[in-house]
């Protein structure tokens, strides 16, 4: 599970992307505001979450997702340079806290970012990695992130 937050002054589409990402990853979302990276890390650890996904924006759109290991206080590679995002309709809802990663020709380093974050015992979010895209799905809700 991930703690998902944003850059300091995110646009509306970045906040919406971060909310959906947190829902699909079974984690928590909190707008960063004036929090430092260290303070965001403390917030994540207080919730029992060991990884943070920072959703950054540029020119009014999500532009990058960077990952931090809160326990080791290390940035994880690679960060994802976002080209486009397609979100489900409506507002995010509660989803399972476990997910399964299927790598169909995607970058193994990206797959490793999601490793060890929950074992499915019932419903689960499916993360499909293909060259240039990450697709997250649960039921009829699907989110697709195209990246460079």
Image: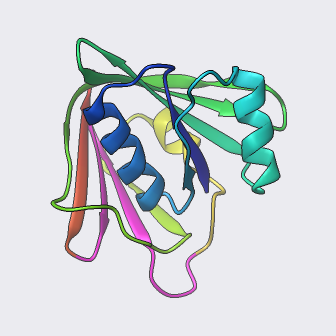
Give the camera-side residue of 67 and 100: 67
User: Residue 58, percent across and down?
Assistant: 30, 13
Left or right of residue 42, residue 12 in this image: left
Q: Residue reaching furthest front?
A: 34
Is residue 125 one of those drawn in magenta? Answer: yes
Q: Name the quarter where the C terminus is drawn.
A: top left
Residue 132 visible here: no
Kindly indicate the quadrant of the structure image that contains residue 74: top right
User: Relative to 23, is 67 on the left or the right?
Assistant: right
Above or below, 9 relative to 6:
above
| Residue at 44%, 72% in the rendered image | 94
Q: Residue at x 49, y 74 (%)?
A: 96
Left/right of residue 32 with respect to residue 24 in the rendered view: right
Q: What's drawn in magenta, residue-wise? A: 120-139
Please provide percent x and percent y for residue 147. 27, 27
Judge left or right: residue 88 versus residue 58. left
Name the magenta segment's main secondary structure. strand
| Residue sitting at x 49%, y 44% | 111
Specify how the rendered protein is coloured.
rainbow
Q: Position of residue 117 (x, y in %)?
A: 63, 58
Give the residue furthest to the top.
59
Task: Identify which residue is drawn at 26% across, 77% down.
Answer: 139
Q: Is residue 56 magenta?
A: no
- Taking 134 as reference, is 124 above or below it? below
Q: Quadrant of residue 16?
A: top left
Q: Is residue 87 visible?
A: yes
Q: Is residue 78 above or below residue 115?
A: above
**Relative image position of residue 10 (x, y in whole percent):** 39, 24
Q: Quadrant of the N terminus?
A: bottom right
Q: How many numbered marks are there?
A: 0
């Amino acid at each position: 599970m991930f703690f998902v937050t944003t850059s300091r002054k995110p646009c509306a589409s970045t906040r919406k992307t971060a909310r959906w990402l947190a829902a699909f990853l079974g984690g928590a979302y909190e707008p960063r505001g004036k929090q430092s990276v260290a303070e965001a890390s403390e917030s994540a650890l207080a919730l029992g979450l060991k990884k943070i996904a920072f959703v950054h924006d540029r020119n009014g759109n999500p532009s990058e997702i960077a990952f931090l290991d809160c326990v080791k206080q290390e940035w994880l590679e690679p960060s994802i340079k976002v080209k486009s995002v397609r979100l489900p309709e409506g507002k995010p809802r509660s989803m399972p806290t476990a997910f399964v990663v299927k790598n169909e020709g995607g970058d193994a380093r990206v797959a490793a970012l999601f490793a060890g974050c929950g074992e499915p015992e019932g419903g689960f979010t499916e993360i499909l990695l293909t060259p240039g895209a990450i697709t997250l799905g649960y039921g009829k809700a699907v989110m697709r992130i195209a990246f460079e």
